Image (cartoon, rainbow, N blue to C red):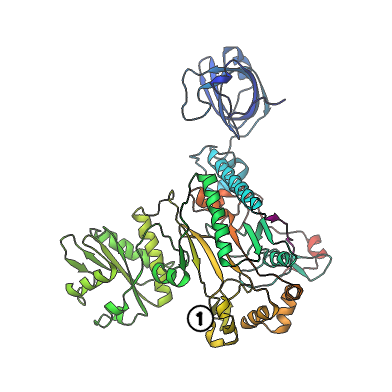
Amino acid sequence: MYRTHTCGELRLENIGTPVTLAGWVQTVRKFGSITFVDLRDRYGITQLLFGEALNPQLDDQPLGREFVIQVEGTVTERSNKNKNIPTGDVEITVSKFTILNKAQTPPFTIQDDTDGGDELRMKYRYLDLRRNIVRQNLELRYRVNRAARNFLDSKGFMDIETPFLIKSTPEGARDFVVPSRMNPNEFYALPQSPQTFKQLLMVSGYDRYYQIVKCFRDEDLRADRQPEFTQIDCEMSFVEQEDILNNFEEMLKYIFKEIKGIEFKDAFPRMTYDHAMEFYGNDKPDIRFEMKLVNMNDTVKGNGFKVFDEAELVVAICAKGCAEYTRKQLDELTEWVKRPQIGMTGLIYARYGADGSIKSSVDKFFDESKLKGWAEKTGAQPGDLILVLAGKEERTRKAMSELRLEMGERLGLRNKDVYAPLWVVDFPLFEYDEEDKRWVAKHHPFTSPKPEQISWMDDLSKYGNIKANAYDIVLNGTEVGGGSIRIFQRDLQEKMFAALGMDEEEFNHKFGFLLGAFEYGAPPHGGMAWGFDRLCALLGGSESIRDFIAFPKNNSGRDVMLDAPSAIDQKQLDELQIALK
């Protein structure tokens, strides 16, 4: 056999035991007539001692980094122990070794503090995966996967696979499409979600379904997005919103206890969408710290300051203990909000000094008594700094939301080891698309209105007020899951499609299979999908989901290791009857 033990399991109690190990050479250190080698595998590192008797063989067959070798020897106690690794009390005195495969010098160091940049490591991802820190990320991912499965299995959920080659129904993000050779000029789509299939499973009587499944969206990328991503997809029959929230809150608590050893004793707080938007500026608030947004319109308008008087919204935050910020720091914050990503023209501030005096960047228009009104409105105390933005309502609220998070980061209030889960509920059912001049679904077209507002679906003037039976689970300012109670009656689903601008021919063409299923005894049902990659990243203390995916794409959606996407040859194009421009 190639090995009797792994490189991570030998301890003092194994001293005197003859062993065979196999793995990769991490480092080689030669000291006169003896050589030390760190041998690495998935399980850890063990130090090898090559004595003087093996020198001739090492001279003939020198070892290099990442060589794959097999050694035979005896476990002995180390004289210079390494307390940083579990095997640091022992080493192997080698009696025989075999080089199983030589290796070229790797393009970057295979260690935690590697000298390889992102693109280089993605090109040689099979080498990057050897690094301890990446291995730990994938181990965490596996443990989260296992914990979710164990919990769902204990609650009677059934893992059922759904198809990857489906029909394109362009709503929301763009589909990835797949040409069909046997059906010329027709295309499959890769699923953005198993949404309609899990609803059909509810119609079929499988009242508790789940799947840890790949989904695909052809959309612009960022740190928490990939063109292919993984969901924990769940659905339940004969449930109301409260049943869903209670069940999946219990699941997240179970995962935290299993993975992090953290127990949440209390129920997760709940916040309405309207409250989140008003006081945090977004629908996924980070509640690890306060610093809420304060609408200042009634306080600051009408004082002759054009920027405020002409703004749709004037909004402020209070940064505790920041009154001593220097002019340089305040100028830096001003430039920060003027970046294209934020889009503001400037930043206004007021320092509330420790001596009780208040000075602002607009003292010409606001004397100290009026600035005291700012302090009262924002809850500022001596020593605090008030930051104010003004402009178009939507852009200004979003910008202040980003500034709030930036200040939280600068003040150390966004500790990655502190977890603050939150349910956001009562989302709007619709939002108005100014570009297309029509109503679109805030969530997706299968989401049910609040039961008491279903009758409003017949009144176009009330569309902006209808609330969805929908909910998101937010963790540290990141949405990690979302779902809804679904529409399960054909007539209501047809009204929903009509509200989104579809005529009867269009919705029957796209979703006739689902509407037909509703006529054969569809039960009340609902569910949610968890962003599995995002959840793993948050549990691992990272903002990038790429660190928790074995073979991720880069920011351009490319696999630089495989060099994909790539051109296909003319024969394939001819078979698919595709002509390139």
Picture quadrant of residue 72: top right
Q: Position of residue 158 (x, y in %)?
A: 70, 55
Decide which of 303, 291 is in the foreground and name it: 291
Picture quadrant of residue 76: top right
Can residue 220 be seen at all in this image of the molecule?
no
**Which residue is drawn at the image coordinates 70% and 54% (left, top)?**
159
Q: Residues within 10 Å of mark 1 (few under 14, many from 20)?
A: few
Q: In this rendering, is residue 1 above or below 285?
A: above
Which contiguous range is marked in magenta?
Answer: 157-165
Q: Is 162 included in the stretch rendered in magenta?
A: yes
Q: Is 27 included in the stretch rendered in magenta?
A: no
**Which residue is drawn at the image coordinates 35% and 55% (left, top)?**
410
Q: In this rendering, is residue 444 above or below 208?
A: below
Decide which of 479, 466 is in the foreground and name it: 466
Q: In this rendering, is residue 263 above or below 362?
A: above
**Which residue is drawn at the image coordinates 55% and 50% (left, top)?**
254
Can residue 548 be seen at all in this image of the molecule?
yes
Q: Position of residue 554 (x, y in %)?
A: 58, 55
Quarter of the image for the C terminus: give it.
bottom right
Please indicate whether residue 502 sits to the left or right of residue 275 in the image.
Answer: right
Q: Which residue is mark 1?
A: 465
Q: Position of residue 522 (x, y in %)?
A: 72, 71
Residue type indicated by callout 1: Asn
